[in-house]
Amino acid sequence: MLSRVADSILWMARYVERAENLARFIDVTLNLQIDIPGSAHTQWEPLVRATGDEESFKKRFETFNERNVITFLTFDRDNPNSIVTILRAARENARSIRETISSETWEQLNAFYHFVRDAADSEEVRESPGDFFMEVKHFCHLLSGVTDATMSHNEGWHFANMGRLLERADKTSRILDVKYFTLLPRVEDVGSPVDDLQWSAVLRSVSGFEMYRKRYHGITVERIVEFLVLDREFPRAIQYCLAEADNSLHAISGTAPGNFANLAEQHLGRLRAELAFCDVKTIINQGLHEFVDGLQSQLNLIGEGITETFIDPQPVA
């Protein structure tokens, strides 16, 4: 496969996954305001922090309120990480590889982009955004299903699958890290009903609340970290995402499972091995923030390895 095509498919999938995660985070924050009246001023800033755009936001808005944050993260065409900008990038990548993806995938993504772009000028959406973000999630689910059902599961599909899963692992780690430090501004809230509602919101942001409750009875930080980081069956858990991304990576390269023939496979295999022999006590004792920092550094190395191996290979000296 041409490196240009591989790069476009990879980033098309990553951008769509990124848009879905933003919609999830915003939708859960909207619902949390209803569950915990008076909490609005503490809920919106962490959302911007999770995207790494706090400084950019402060240059343009004075306060972290619902309207400003939703505008910035959803409809702001000058914000490179807003949903509308991300989907525009996904659409441009898809446009350049229309001969590789299915026509149904292109049509769904094109409709998705126009839906969000048109909503930017709708006062109704700004006044009542909950239904809009629900529709964004539905578009993402439809696009994922259409791609899976109408594309041959060849190299192109595996690049898309790998990009989507690596992005998902990154976003799960980011929301867990940001919420861990900013969710509870007061120590006296720990273990309270407010505490349960807040951590339930973390689970809902990754659609994990129901699956978590089927496995665990009580809500604790340790169990949530274990579920979202180390679970091997939940589709948005970091360990699950990395395992499936590794399967696609090996399908692309043809390397036997458990071996590596390039930097991407080496970095991803090392990270998977670390998580396989890790437990939640080790993560908590190390410090969740420090653990996530290290995890994201390794995810960056995996991305660089993919680029060096498949997208921009360097000539052998």
Image (cartoon, rainbow, N blue to C red):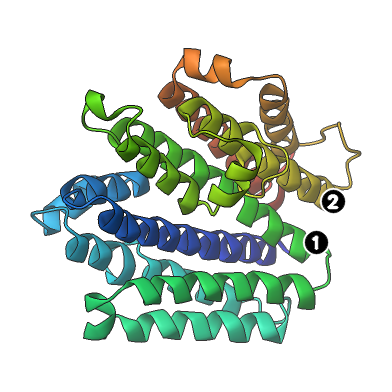
Q: What is the quadrant of the C terminus in the image?
A: top right
- Cα–Cα gap, marks 2 and 1: 8 Å
Q: Secondary structure at mark 2?
A: helix
- Looking at the rendered structure, the secondary structure element under dot 1 is helix
Name the residue at the right extreme.
256
33 or 47, nearer to the observer: 33
Residue carrying label 1? 155
What's the amino acid at mark 1? Glu
- Residue 315 vs residue 101, the one in the foreground: 101
Expressed as whole percent of the image width and height from the top left, the position of residue 182 reads: 28, 35
Q: Residue at x 53, y 48 (%)?
A: 209
Q: Can residue 1 be seen here?
A: no
The image shows residue 175, relative to residue 136, as above or below, that is above
Q: Is residue 89 left or right of residue 266?
A: left
Q: Position of residue 308 (x, y in %)?
A: 65, 44
Residue situated in front as seen by the camera: 52 or 138 = 138
Local packing at callout 2 (Cα closer than 10 Å; few below 14, some 14-19, many 20+) is some
Q: Nearer the viewer, residue 36 or 128?
A: 36
Q: Residue at x 39, y 79 (%)?
A: 116
Residue 1, image quadrant: bottom right
Q: Is residue 89 above or below residue 295?
A: below
Q: Which residue is mark 2?
A: 251
The residue at the far left in this view is 62
Q: Residue at x 45, y 72 (%)?
A: 134
The answer to the question of whether label 2 and label 1 lie on touching residues, with beta carbons closer than 8 A, is yes
Q: Is residue 259 left or right of residue 68?
A: right
- Residue 48, which numbered label? none
Q: Is residue 34 above or below residue 50?
A: below
Alpha-carbon neighbours of circle 1 within 10 Å: few (<14), some, or many (≥20)? some
Q: Is residue 188 something that shows in the picture? A: yes
22 horizontally vs 282: left or right = left
Residue type of the residue flagged with mark 2: Ala
